[in-house]
Image (cartoon, grey):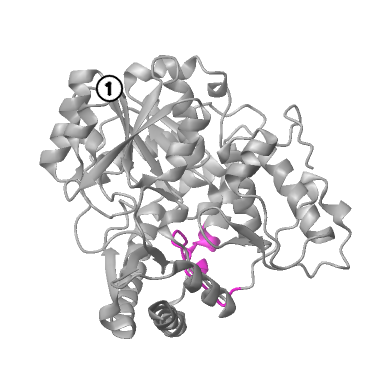
Amino acid sequence: MYVLDSNNKIPLHIQLYQAIKKDIISSYKIGDKLFSIRKMCNRYNLSKTTVSNAYSQLVIEGYIDSKNRSSYFVIENNYKDIDASCFNEMNEIKIRKPNYDYDFYPARQEKDSFPIKIWKRLSNKSLDANFDYCDNSQAKGERGLIEEISKYLRLSRKVKCEPSQIIVCHGFDDSMFLLSKILKKTHKSLALECPGYKLAQDIFLEQGYSIDKIALNKQGIIVKDLEKTKSKVLYLTPSHQFPTGVSIPISNRLQILAWAKKNKAFIIEDDYDSELSYYNRPIPSLQGLNENDSVIYLGTFSKSLSPSLRISYMVLPKQLLVAYDNLSDSKHARVSLMLQNTLYLFMKEGFWDKHQRKVRTLNKRKHKLMKELLLDKLKDTVIIKSEGIGLSLVIDSKDKMDFNLLHSLALKEKIKIYFVHDVAIGTYDGIRMGFGGLKEEDLEKAIEIFSKIWFLALKKKKY
């Protein structure tokens, strides 16, 4: 029985995470099964997002893993000499790195790609510069940084905006949380691509929205299905649809913009991965085509620079700025002043553009190598569903694959793989094979081991 305090300063998902981890250390055995997310929600009257976040942290730290969408089990408990009480306080949490030889995480850069020396120098420079660190930073973001972001978006993504429309946020979930509150007074439902990004759905569900799932075809969302709904807010990934990889053509984009204009609706354009296009010029943003002030643009520095910095941003239509200003959440900055100023100098002095070219060149080589290795090792048993952009390829088996068996075999070989169904709504199977975090020299060995468990899973499925 877990006792969680909603009035505690420690967030509920951290309280739940701490409680479960304490139980794992003190009494659980390897293989013990945890409550499903749904059962945990019902038992303790928690939101799905709260339980999912707690479980996700336990997965990251290597305490538990999932066999399918809802089943979680303990995978390690060699903690006999650890006093479980040391995990009671949030500031005493120790992060354990999971024991994997190869981790195909789909949204990570190679460790050595981060420009640590330049970042250190600019951090020190920001301390020496004329920044007042005793003053509260501007709520929307530091002026210099949002001006640099505005210039970058105008040149690289054809986004039309003024610096006053940009809000610097603490990651994608923070951006979506803010939007759910900004739109809540006038909107009760969200239209979402299906298959689509599960976290976007969960954040709006937690704020009380209903969800309209819009099917896809090769052109992107089916606009006729969108027109049948009552939703006046649409979440969209038009440049690189998640998880299918479809890029919405201009004809479909214009239909979507026409729908927004006709219905006085808003479009949330999540432009993730747009800067990591390897073989074609990035498609200009949907926001840049919009003449009706109806597109909310989301971007991030996580993919190209570092996910640990947790810096994202959004461009609000001018008509939503008053609604944002009225939020209590709009009164304080969401990202530290020092971090913002370091990033400002990084962009102003030209390092951001150089860094993007560097990681794009490096990951283009790794993308090409992984594709060649997968086709060579897996032969005609594999389908590559999504490629050419981002830090991963989505693959599937031509024959039916037992993903639970593949997952178990991967764990035995100390390989971490990621399934589309863990992060996507709808029925879209596949494995997200991340290459960004692996060194080029490690890719061949990693795919060699992966290919062995792939064929073993296929062979056992046939019997």
Instruction: Decide if residue 346 is on the left or right side of residue 254.
Output: right
Residue 386 x %, y %: 28, 61
Question: From which residue to which does the magenta span run?
Answer: 100-118
273, above or below 146, in the image: below
In the rendering, at what x and y percent does residue 6 appear?
72, 29
Q: Name the residue under label 1.
A: 265
Question: Which residue shows up at 33% across the image and 61% down it?
Answer: 357
Q: In which quarter of the image is the C terminus?
A: bottom left
Side (left or right) of 101 relative to 447: right
- Residue 71: name its quadrant: bottom right
Rendered view: 365 above or below 224: below
Q: Which of 113 and 462 lies nearest the eye of the viewer?
A: 462
Residue extending farthest to the left is 251
- For disc 1, the neighbor class at 10 Å (few under 14, some 14 to 19, many from 20) is some
Residue 254: quadrant of the picture: top left
Q: In which quarter of the image is the N terminus?
A: top right
Q: Is residue 168 left or right of residue 58?
A: left
Above or below 255: residue 78? below
Residue 115 is inside the magenta segment: yes
